[in-house]
Image: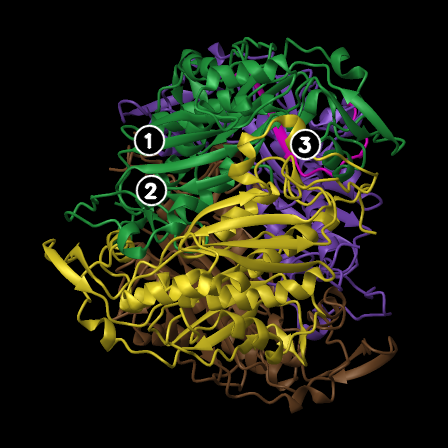
Chain colours: A yellow, B green, C brown, D purple
């Protein structure tokens, strides 16, 4: 299904060059304050227009079409819609039937029997992440005072991010990156043993973001080289606080009360200006493609706020669920 | 919820030192051949008793209590049960109230208000993976002729796995590892754009396996250092075959018809014989723990067949779903 | 959750006096033909403005904001939106804090802590059924050649429906009714034994329609007076055709290939012009209410097309699921 | 799927003449007291062996195989198993390939391609309701102090139930009945507007019980003859108490704090000793069947405790969900 979450449930919709994109948020507790202005900061962080990001810039003004009245969530499903304005389908016209290597063009074409809307990536476009960010704004309000931060650790294998991006741009090429996200103030015990462990649910949402090829919690892959006596985080008191945080805040699929730390691998943007070999989707014949359109040199630059949204959505859903676990049946 | 899957749905149950563990498999197509003997090979691969794995050895004879008749699936829910026999709760007695560092002891204790069955790890024990492997046996029959293989790439950061494990065992310590899994023969288009992408769903199940701290698809983290022109896999014909496979078989959340390749990071087994500092769960006071009980020096050694089961379950579920996508409504 | 369905999934949103209402349809097979004109007939049947129905008349022009391109479903989520135009919140102003007896005013107020949008019934308004009807239009295309019909059997306990409605209107009162729906051309075997039996799933959706207080399949309550030898429908051939249809097309939770027949009880519209005792939601004090606003004398008059939509959605979902049951695993 | 519930989730399994039947209960709050003795009373009420019910009598001793330790729920999935002992498949041998009219024999045979276990009704047998009753025992503990009662209103259209059943038994025939269930002590606001209204969810579970052909809430079908001014229940104070209860405790899909009252129609037991025409499932030819085996003359006699279980499960799930609605995000 194209939806996510159990008690706080989201569904994103829209196409890159269709009339609108957006998100339906279902299960937001009534009474939470929500105004259109609340979305500006995070949507601004997601936006293109800076060096290394796409030249396409949408105003990204959210229209709250349901579920909000007088600046507060009503408890009914909340539809948040963004009109598409800055659309230039003609840029993609020349390559319309050419499958961009590394992109969803080929797989979507085949999955949907040729009926997928493929203009500008269609439903598979990075533009869809506007809906995730908008839902994240709502989730961040729900999880307060839990806080979330993120940082780009590297681009194209280098920590000199600016220089790496500029070099790739000059070559009409693209680069990937590694982004880290940290969640502070989590309670102990969010998550389920099987199969909705905290990291199961988190990775589920994170891998829905276009271009993600890996995720690791705490020491992750690096930690496989350690001995158990080194890796184990020693509990220092009954609150669950540990001396180190190799586990990244999770034991047995459950949050342990320490900072949740995870990193993701973002692949280089598949759409590049350089010539690439490919095939024509209609004829099946070899072709050469030099992509027009506007796209990110490094999509990882836009990822921090999207990752934060994903983390906030997962935390919010688990917090809502956690309230039901309280011992002693009956509605108190 | 403690269940997984949409059309092929599993739920595992049981505790390490309770009467039984097992799995409920719901949605297996009627007519698939299933006999108790079918499970022997995969359960044998999962079993302990070899160097580096736990000394606890269960007979692991599956009892098919429902959903199977005359050697074939009936279409009703299938309950597969394994009696626990080789239980030595007394080994854990001394440390009963001491939280093993790195283990779920503390988080489970807190999540379930002190009522969790904590003997031998309880519901969080690696013993529960017997149910995943058993469900995987069923799934592998459903997905034929798709085939799955796996290999341990490293242990404790070294490719000399045998030596690394022996050294850790000698020190009453443990090590982690990296395991790779490859799925061959997949059709194009399994997965959903948002939010049930193929890798979302796969990572969801994989992170339910105890001790997993990372997953990457194709080039994963290494691929973030590449340029787009290097990373993009060039399509060579209309079947979707690509010249390289940096994407690991997935584009836009959908399988692309090439081999699916993913790797996971397995942390060092938390339970070790060496003395470790910790706290007493009841008093909250500092304590020193030298773990008794039987446990794996390197849990990664048992992981290949479990990972294969996870991959088979995800593929089977998506294949069942994919049949519904065929264009032209109506039951044909 | 405010969503319904497994493979064909819908979620309705909006408020009676908010900017819009509509429905998200997820899982529509790609390639199905969908144009705005397709919705006119069914939306017209649902509309008010006729004797016995509300004077509020919306143009009900569907805006297809995603998931459709060039007149065909793309396979991505389909957002169908209806702008609200004919809104007169002021009619409800006088009674704003008075709970209409029999309506959701009191329960919604309490459930959502006073934050529910209560203008004109808010999210609980019959206006929301426009989304169900629109989704039903899509579902009817999917299930072809299965066909659905419906009829009003009685109003206010009488078969002279016109007269009964006129009399109630003259008294500024309202009446209920019984509506029957028949589905023809169903295959054998739609539904699951536990817990998604065909009638479980059908009644789930039907009871979401405002004002429904009962549902019965085949002979229903009347059939409890029969002997088994009378009630049992005799199979006449291997197709499953039966001589009689007391079971209404279902045995053991599964369709049996005969006509599916069910009836629903629609309560009298709660909002009436006559004076009624009630309480003030804010002060908790007794009050007297003579409802303004525009409302149906007999909501049952608008029900046939809504019931058909519900039946079509259930059939479509089960048909999509049924394709996955085919014996012999593997994607054929 | 063969499972039910969102936070309290159940799945029943087994076949009438297989090794066992039972239920998996997932999501029971940790700490609830559960002992095998707790099940005796309700299982006893469900049992056959009395006039009008089947002669098959199982000991029905529940085996708690997981999720319970020391007499309390641990928070992990709870597997409750009943061994089948009193099985006489030979009684069904003669009619093995003859489809019992009115039963699931034909539909199950066709749905599962001939692989369904059809001995004694297989997975479609009333025996499966033991699992529902067992899960209901757990749910009743969770919902305390909410209480549930039920009564048989009529059998075969008569209130002289004993005489009606005896007459049908003498004719080797069967009768149906109407059963009413009442839930007292519910809070206001359980349920969701669309599509998980309280009665949607309740009817979903109720229609999974074999033989149910109708359900009505409050005045139900009778209420369609009333005027709105008669049907509307007048609120008498701010607690939500109403002067009458025509709505049966529900407005707008939400509980309103008054008694929840619903009735179900139970069809006559399809399996009867009298000769009936039918077809042979293998040859497709007409045949005559005089059913052996042991069966209920009036299944409605066993229904009260099953209905109560269904109501308890729905209430428990909604209560767990309701805790998450509390305004003000964050885990308090």
Q: Nearer the viewer, residue D259 or D196?
A: D196
- Judge whether residue D42 is colored magenta: no
Say if B149 sits above or below B36 in the image: below
Label 3 or label 2, whichever lies nearer to me, is: 3
Say if A22 sits above or below A311 in the image: below
Residue interval drawn in magenta: D17-35
- Judge whether residue D22 is colored magenta: yes
Label 2 or label 1, whichever lies nearer to me, is: 2
Circles 3 and 1 on the same subunit? no
Location of mark 3 (residue): A232
Chain of the residue on which disc 2 is drawn? B
Q: CA distance from mark 3 to mark 2?
A: 32 Å
Of callouts 2 and 1, which one flags the residue occurring earlier in the amino acid sequence? 1
**Residue D203 x/y as whole percent:** 60, 49
Q: Residue sitting at 37 percent across and 29 percent down?
A: D109
Q: Residues within 10 Å of mark 2 (few under 14, many from 20)?
A: many
Mark number displayed over residue B248: 2
The answer to whether residue D240 of the structure is visible from this angle is yes
Chain of the residue on which disc 1 is drawn? B
**Residue A52 x/y as whole percent:** 40, 69
Picture quarter with the N terminus of chain C: bottom right
Q: CA distance from mark 2 to mark 1?
A: 19 Å
Number of numbered discs:
3
**Residue B44 x/y as whole percent:** 46, 13
Our reading of the magenta stretch's main secondary structure is loop
Q: Nearer the viewer, residue D104 or B178?
A: B178
Location of mark 1 (residue): B143
- Badge 1 marks a residue whose secondary structure is helix
- Badge 3 marks a residue whose secondary structure is loop
Q: Residues within 10 Å of mark 1 (few under 14, many from 20)?
A: many
């Amino acid at each position: 299904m194209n939806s996510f979450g159990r008690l706080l449930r989201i569904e994103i919709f829209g196409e890159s060059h269709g009339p609108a994109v957006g998100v339906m948020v279902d299960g937001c507790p009534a009474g939470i304050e929500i105004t259109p202005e609340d979305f500006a900061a995070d949507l601004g962080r997601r936006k293109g227009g800076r060096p290394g990001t796409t030249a396409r810039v949408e105003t990204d003004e959210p229209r709250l079409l349901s579920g909000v009245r007088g600046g507060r969530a009503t408890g009914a499903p909340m539809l948040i819609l963004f009109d598409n304005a800055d659309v230039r389908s003609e840029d993609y016209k020349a390559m319309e039937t050419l499958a961009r290597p590394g992109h969803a063009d080929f797989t979507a074409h085949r999955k949907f029997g040729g009926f997928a809307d493929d203009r500008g990536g269609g439903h598979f476009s990075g533009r869809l992440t506007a809906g995730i960010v908008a839902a994240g704004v709502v989730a961040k309000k729900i999880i307060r005072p839990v806080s979330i931060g993120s940082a780009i650790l590297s681009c194209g294998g280098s920590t000199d991010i600016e220089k790496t991006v500029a070099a790739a741009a000059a070559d009409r090429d693209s680069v990937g990156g590694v982004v880290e996200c940290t969640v502070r103030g989590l309670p102990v015990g969010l998550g389920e043993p099987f199969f909705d462990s905290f990291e199961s649910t988190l990775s589920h949402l994170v891998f829905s973001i276009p271009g993600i090829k890996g995720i690791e919690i705490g020491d992750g892959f690096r930690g496989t080289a350690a001995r158990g006596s080194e890796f184990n985080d020693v509990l220092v008191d009954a609150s669950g606080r540990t001396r180190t945080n190799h586990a990244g805040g999770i034991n047995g699929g459950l949050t342990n009360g320490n900072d949740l730390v995870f990193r993701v691998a973002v692949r280089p943007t598949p759409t590049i200006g350089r010539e690439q070999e490919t095939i024509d989707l209609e004829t099946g014949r070899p072709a050469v493609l030099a992509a027009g359109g506007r796209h990110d040199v490094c999509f990882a630059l836009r990822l921090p706020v999207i990752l934060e949204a994903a983390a906030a959505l997962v935390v919010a859903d688990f917090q809502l669920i956690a309230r039901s676990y309280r011992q002693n049946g009956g509605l108190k």
